[in-house]
Structures are given as C-alpha cells and as structure tokens.
Image (cartoon, grey):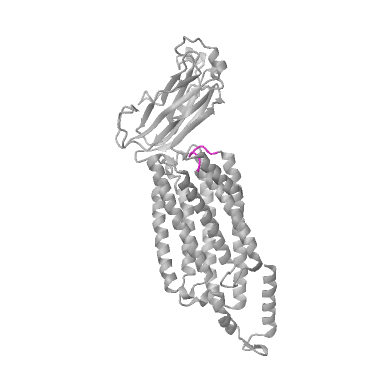
Amino acid sequence: MGFWAAWILLLLIGASNASIHDYKKEKFIPQANSRFFHGGSEGLYASNSQDLNTSSSPDISLKGKSFIRFADVTFVRTMESASKQNPMQSTAGLVEAILLEVKDRDRIGGSFLKSNAICCTPDLADAGSCTLGEVIIKRDSNDDKWPRQIKTFFKGNKTEAAMLPETVVINKTGMYYLYFVICDPGLDGTVIRGRTVWKNPDGYLPGKVAPLMKFFGFMSLAYLLLGLVWFLRFVKFWKDIIQLHYHITLVIALGMCEMAVRYFEYANFDSTGMRPMDVTLWAVTFASIKKTLSRLLLLVVSMGFGVVKPTLGGMSSRVLLLGVVYFVATEALELVEHLGNINDFSGKTLIYLVIPVAILDACFILWIFSSLARTLEKLQIKRNMAKLELYRNFTNSLAVSVLLSIAWIGFELYFNASDPLSELWRMAWIIPAFWNLLSYGLLAVICILWAPSNNPTRYSYLAETGDEFEEEGISLTSGGIKITGDVERNELLYGLADEVEEDKRE
C-alpha cells in the first residue's frame, strides 16, 4: 500500500530534473563570515570548439559547446531587510554567483592569505588583498576572469533582485561547482529561486553518468543475445522443460526490459535535460523486480527446487515474504537515487535506505549458502554424482561472485572516501556498471548449468526417481522394499529417516 502511495505522489510531483537544477526558495547557510548556497556540481567536458569568450548571449549558437546557463534566477530578501534601505539607492545589497573548477577551490576564501574568512574583511581590504563586502578570490594567472564571479545587486528597497540571463561556456574538462554567496549581514533570511542549466557538448547527461547510456545499450544487446540462445533451446526441448526454466526465462526477460528502458531513459535525459517521470519509474520498477527475482532464483536453486525436491514445502511462504520485503526496500532506494537531482539527495535519507537493503542481501547470502550445504549433503548421501557435480560448479561460481562483490565493495568504499569532491568523476560510472555485469554473469552461469536439453534427468526431480533408487540398489515391490547389492538396511533406513526429518524441519 505504501509503495503505491509513493508512486502516485511522485506522479503528481511531475518530471524530475538533473542537469536542470531547480531552486525553490532555498535558504542560504551561514559559513564563516558569509552566507552561501550550493547551486550544483557536475562533471563537464570541454566544448568541441574552444572560445576565448566564456560568456554567450542567447543569439549565439551553443551547438557543440559545454555551458552553464542562469535562467530566471531571482533572490528574495525579507521585508525587514528591504525596509532599511533608501529607495533611491542603486545598489543596496550584493549576491555573488561563484563558478569554479574543483581544483581551484583554494582560490576562494582567505586560505591563501592565511585567513579563515570567505568575505573580505576591513583589514584585508586595507592591505589591498580584496574588495570589502565581496568574496575573496585569487584569480588564475592565465585567466583573470577565473574563477568566475557574477554580481547581482538589490536596488533601493525592493525585495527581489533578478540575475541577468547569462551563459558561461566551459572550455576545460573538469568537475565544476557553483556557489551563491552573500557577504552583507543585512541580507540574512534571503532565499533563492529559479534554475541553472548544465550541458555537455553532446547532450545534457552529467559527465559522471554519460558513459552509462552506451553501457546500457551494450547490456541490452547482451541480454538480447542471451535471451535468443535460451529461447532457441527452450523451444527445441520444450517437452523436457521444468518449472525452474520458466523462472529463468522470466529473469532474462526482465533483464532485457530493464536495460532497454534504462537506455531510453538516459537517451531522453541526454536530449532534453530532464528525466521523464513515467520512464524513470518503469526503469526503477523493472530494476527492483529483476533484482528481487534474481535473488529468489539463486535461493530456490540452492534449495534444490525441481532438482532435489519437487516443491519448497513449508518454506514457500518464508521465501515469498523475504522477496516482498526486499522488493519494497530496493524500490524505495532506487526511487531516492534516480528521481532527484544528481547531487541533491539527502545523505542521511540514502543511508537509512541503504542499510535495510544491505541487511536483506546478507540474509539472502546466508540462506543461499546454508541451503547449498544441505543440498550438497543430500546429493552425497544419495550418491547422485551428476547432480553433485552440477551443484559443486554452481557453488564455486557463487563463491567467486561473493568474493568479487566483497572486493568491489571495498574498492567502492575506498573510492568514495578518497574522492569526497568527485574529482575522479570520469570513473564513477564503472561502479554501477560492475553490479550489472556481475548480475548478468551469474544469470549466464545458471543458464549454462540448467540449460534445457533432451536429458533432463541430470536436474529434474521427477525424472530422477527411478534412476536414483536404482543407483542405490533399491527395488520397489508389492511386498515392500527389497535391499539388493552392497547397501546395508540400517544405512538406507537411516538415510530415509534423516531426509524425512529434514523435510519436516524445512
């Protein structure tokens, strides 16, 4: 119920922006001797054609250029602040927009002057180091206009001041930050509204996720190829299909849909600068369903469903409950990650959503490996070497994937800890790409191990009954069970009793 309520609420909100950063009466935060607002940060590639003039008017073509455009940005101060000003004053309060590359962060503020101040103080002004009432900026020796400083003044006793429309052309590849700063204490309580548009030379996709569009296109083809091969074998041996094969088919189909929808979502985002709400919701939902069913597939395979046992018995409700809880937790996390501005989601909110998903993933891993241990033990008791080898190969593949996951989580933690300002933004796309590749690899392994064939006795429970009992030297007669060969009666009875007792526990 909560999921559908969240879905309807998001539909009512409208399209979500990313490269278009919206400001909806946001407040300025006190910092040192200033008040500032973080207007956005994104990785931008250099324009295809270099231009010494970094400012552009609306009538100049921006095709092939990377830029940041200020659109309808307006500052609103309080009535109390406005009433203290002379109506005839031409400049009665200053707000500065500071645009810089992350490597130039030390050029903002008084750190190079051995001061903690961000705004110029009377002492520094008297020394000729800066202009009183403005942000302290150390200009680049190669470009006296960089970091970029755009000033907007309030006039007289008006409560609003609008920035002039301006577009800043980006000629260097880098991670860019935009701050709005107020140095005048009389402007306390000022808020900002409007938006800024950030664009790369080839589209609106932020630089840190732009490679993912091509990656999702590649993965769509990979799932299509896997689905085609699986479908051909499915049709060829359809008479020997077991229920597990339908589950695998569903996961492959969901993978194809997820990758295709992701690709079209990013393609639309790249061309318009906005994430379409409906497409993004479908992409998020496909991803959550596929993740849930993939984990359930690993779990039921590990339990021996359709291979060692015909049904899950009393465990079905527990498996279903874990799947539903995991879907809800994953859906909530995906919504927060993909339906907000690229750099605008709350860190605390994300942590609260990541922790439940991580705990549930741990539950899946523990349950999968404990189930695998019991399944391998059963097959050893039954001396079914073909199926034992099948499950050993599956166990080894799963163990390798878990080790890779642990190693990658360690790398991801190190990457995020060592790059708090996203200076390595051009490598960021490989983190989500790895998880998609790992999921695809595990699915491919399952498809290979449990591929439909004209010899289903190697994995089908129903087909194994006669062969298995023949292997163990048991023949069923009207008079009961007759023991033949070298198998001792007490060993057989112990094995059967143990199996019945284990089924009851499950």
Q: Can residue 81 be seen in this view?
A: yes
- Is 190 rendered above or below residue 278? above
Q: Residue at left 55%, top 13%?
A: 83
Q: State whether residue 298 is above or below residue 346.
A: below
Residue 429 placed where, x, y %? 44, 46
Q: Taking the image as drawn, is residue 110 in sight?
A: no
Q: Residue at x 44, y 57 (%)?
A: 256
Marks counted in the figure total 0
* Magenta-colored stretch includes residue 344: yes
Residue 209 spot, x, y in % from top left: 43, 44
Q: Is residue 25 magenta?
A: no
Q: In which quarter of the image is the C terminus?
A: bottom right
Above or below for 272 versus 430:
above
Could you say which quadrant of the image residue 27 lies in?
top right
Residue 149 vertical placement versus 275 (above, below): above
Between residues 255 and 5, which one lies in front from this camera angle? Answer: 5
The magenta stretch spans which residues?
A: 339-345
Task: Give the x, y percent position of residue 154.
Answer: 47, 17
Residue 118 versus residue 349: which sits nearer the camera? 349
- The secondary structure making up most of the magenta span is loop
Decide which of 161, 175 is in the foreground and name it: 161
